[in-house]
Structure formats: C-alpha cells, structure tokens
Image: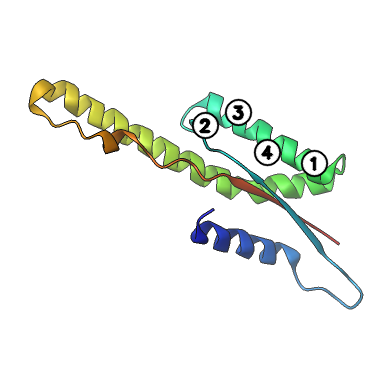
Amino acid sequence: MTPIHLIFVMAAALSLTGPATAGERYETRQIAVPAAGLDLSTEAGIDILAARIDHAVKRICGRDRACADGAWQSTEWQVDRLIRAARAWRRLADERAAQLRACRERCARPAAWYAPPPPAGVTVIVVRN
C-alpha cells in the first residue's frame, strides 16, 4: 500500500469513528482485500473483487447487517477509484493499439505502454461501539 493510500485509509477510519462520549469505546477493524491480478476494466474482474470484499465483510461482521452495510460503504470510493483507473488504462491501451495498427511497421513499439501498474486493493473498515 502506498503512503497516499494509507493516508486515505486512515482518514476514512478517523471520519467513521466520530466523537466518543464518556464511557463509549469504539473498535476499528479492517481487512486488506487484494486486487492484484484482476482486470477491473471488465465485469468479470469486478465480480471477483466483489466476492473478495464480500468474504472480508463476512469475516469482520458475521451476520450483523448494520455492520455489513457500513463495511460495504467503506469500500465504495476505493472500488470506484480502482475501476476508473483500470478503464482509463484500457482506453489508453486500445488507443495505442489502434495507432500501431494504423502505422504498421513505421511506429516504435514501447513495451512499457502496455503495462499499467497493478491495482493496489481495497481496505474494508468497520467501526463498532
């Protein structure tokens, strides 16, 4: 997890805790869900990530519906960010492939153009009192 991701996760955890009144204790639990190896520009990749998140939510919350709703909500912005990045990389790759087809052998073929960074993953966060 990069430092910027860690800052977002910490900020999300702090924003979920809220002010504690006298005698109240809050417990924060989180599980990292890996997204490496998934193509999140496709529905199949998104479905696999959703299944991984569902497994993590069940590990944290069990059958507690309110807990599960909060856990899923904690992942929405993270999943949205990963999907947008994957789709942007897919568009760039498609555009570059079209350019290469158009100019055939006259174009250079840089290998780095086709290797987007792997998706970092998602952190499921639950705050209970």
The reply, left or right, for residue 60 in relation to residue 118 is right
SS of the residue at dot 3? helix
The residue nearer to you, when weighing 14 against 114, is 114
In percent of width and height, residue 21 lies at 85, 76
Give the crowd class for mark 4: few <14, some 14-19, many >=20 residues within 10 Å. many
Which residue does the numbered mark 2 point to in the structure image? 38
SS of the residue at dot 4? helix
**Which amino acid type is marked by label 2?**
Leu
Give the mark nearer the N terminus: 1 vs 3: 3
Asked whether the beta carbons under mark 1 and mark 3 sit within 8 Å of each other, the answer is no
Label 2 – label 1 distance at C-alpha: 22 Å
Which residue does the numbered mark 1 point to in the structure image? 59
Q: Which label number is shown at residue 47? A: 3
**Which amino acid type is marked by label 3?**
Asp
Label 2 – label 3 distance at C-alpha: 10 Å
- Determine whether 15 is above or below 91 in the image: below
